[in-house]
Image: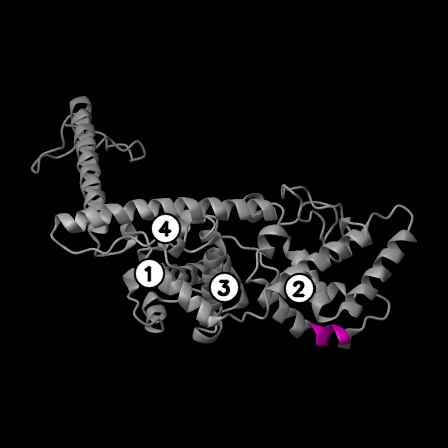
Amino acid sequence: MAVSNGASASAAPSADATPPPGGAGAAGPSPYHESSQFRHWRYSRGRLAALRAELNEKSKEVTARNMAAEKEAQLSLGHSFTDPPPAATYPTVDEELNLVWFYCNQASQICRHGFGLSEEVETTAISYMKRFYLKNSVMEWHPKSIMPTCVFLAAKTCNHPVPIDVLVSKLKGFKPADVLDLEFLVAQSLSFEFWVRGADKALRGWSLELQDQAKPPVDAIQRALPAALDRLRWSRYTDAEFIYTPSQVALACFRLANAELVDSFLEFRYAAASATEGAGLPYGLPLDDLLRLTKEIEGVIRDAGQGEFDMKTIKEIDKRLKSCTNPEKIPGTALYIKRKAEADAKAVEAKAEKAAKVAAAREADELTFGGALGAGAKAAVPDDPFAPPPPPPKAE
């Protein structure tokens, strides 16, 4: 189980240093290290914080500007419009993140209890939510609207599709169009990179790896696995997947479940490697570095709690968000209607331009090759080169 290439300052990709569990061949990059997730969705803590702060500030500016434009449009129509909220009303980065984590939890509940979907679908849907809000703000797209689309898309990409009518039947106040209309937006925000490598498979890989010793404590491993899976579920409400590899997160979850079990196995594995001439470092790291990294991840997971949320805080954030959501994204507002009309006009213009190009191409073809045959005309059929020769003429 390769765990090298931890959370570096730049989170730069590098090749894996060790073969997978049970592998005896030459070392090579794992599927994770060759994935778009490794190349495009890994960050340092500092980079994540900077991304979110920049997005939060930009969204505040855009929302405030569009609020002023909406007020002007409403007043020009003779409608009343309350003044935009003060700057203090807008959600902070942490408040945005709290709301996103809460709706990630809602996605988990829907996958598990609403449809009995696999853990793979649940992991993927939550990852889609987290990735979406690295590029979009809750001030533009409320997580309540985005979450069902992430679940719907994750079910499809994991080959466990849920019919749209079945999905919305369990979502109060949603119509099929509410989910489908946002599908392209979500896919675009994901850069059309749908593959998600969760830590669930790595966790089960570690359960086998821990048995790779002379007298494996099978009972202890089996007892620790359910608790490790619980810790893995809690880890989904953190940034762990953006900073660490799946195998690193999985090892930390196992160690949270039974530290003595993991530590004794690692000591055995490193002792065996040091006694073997020419053997490299197990898992590509010195033991002290591996334990330091694992404990660091454990702290991240502990800080997240057990997927519990302060509902009073969540409701307060959500209430304030209603007064400072970008009106350009709210159906029925003057700005929304204006932007939609502009988009529709562009679509009509593009369609007309395409039709003109098709007509011009058809006209050019007719000038070169001649027009189409008339209804009564009969196309000449070339002689069949494989037909039998005609019979000789009869002698007179």
Among the two numbered marks 4 and 2 on one chain, the one whose residue lies closer to the N terminus:
4
The answer for how far apart the CA atoms under marks 4 and 2 are is: 32 Å
* Percent x, y of residue 354: 21, 35
Residue type, mark 3 in image: Val
Q: Amino acid at mark 4?
A: Leu
Q: Earlier in the sequence, mark 3 or mark 4?
A: 3
Q: Which residues are magenta?
A: 220-224
| Residue named by callout 1 | 322
Figure quadrant of the N terminus:
bottom right
- What amino acid type should be assigned to the residue bearing mark 1? Lys
Rendered image: mark on residue 121: 3
Residue located 85% across and 71% down the image: 215
Mark 2: amino acid: Leu
| Front residue of 224 and 104 | 104
- Residue farthest toward the top in the current orientation of the protein: 368
Residue under the image location 54 percent in, 55 percent down: 196
Numbered circle sitting on residue 185: 4
Task: Please say if 152 is above or below 282.
Answer: below
Instruction: Kindly identify the residue that appears in the image at 28 percent across and 32 percent down.
Output: 389
Marked residue nearer the N-terminal end (1 or 2)? 2
User: Which disc, if any, is residue 203?
Assistant: 2
Residues under numbered marks 1 and 2 in contact, where contact means CB atoms less than 8 Å apart: no
Q: Is residue 68 visible?
A: yes
Q: Nearer the viewer, mark 1 or mark 2?
A: 1
Q: Secondary structure at mark 2?
A: helix
Looking at this rendering, what residue extends furthest in the left direction? 376
Distance Cα–Cα, label 1 vs label 3 = 30 Å
Kindly state the secondary structure of the residue where label 1 is placed.
helix
Which label is found at residue 219?
none
Binning the other alpha carbons within 10 Å of mark 1 as few (below 14), some (14 to 19) or many (20 upward) gives few
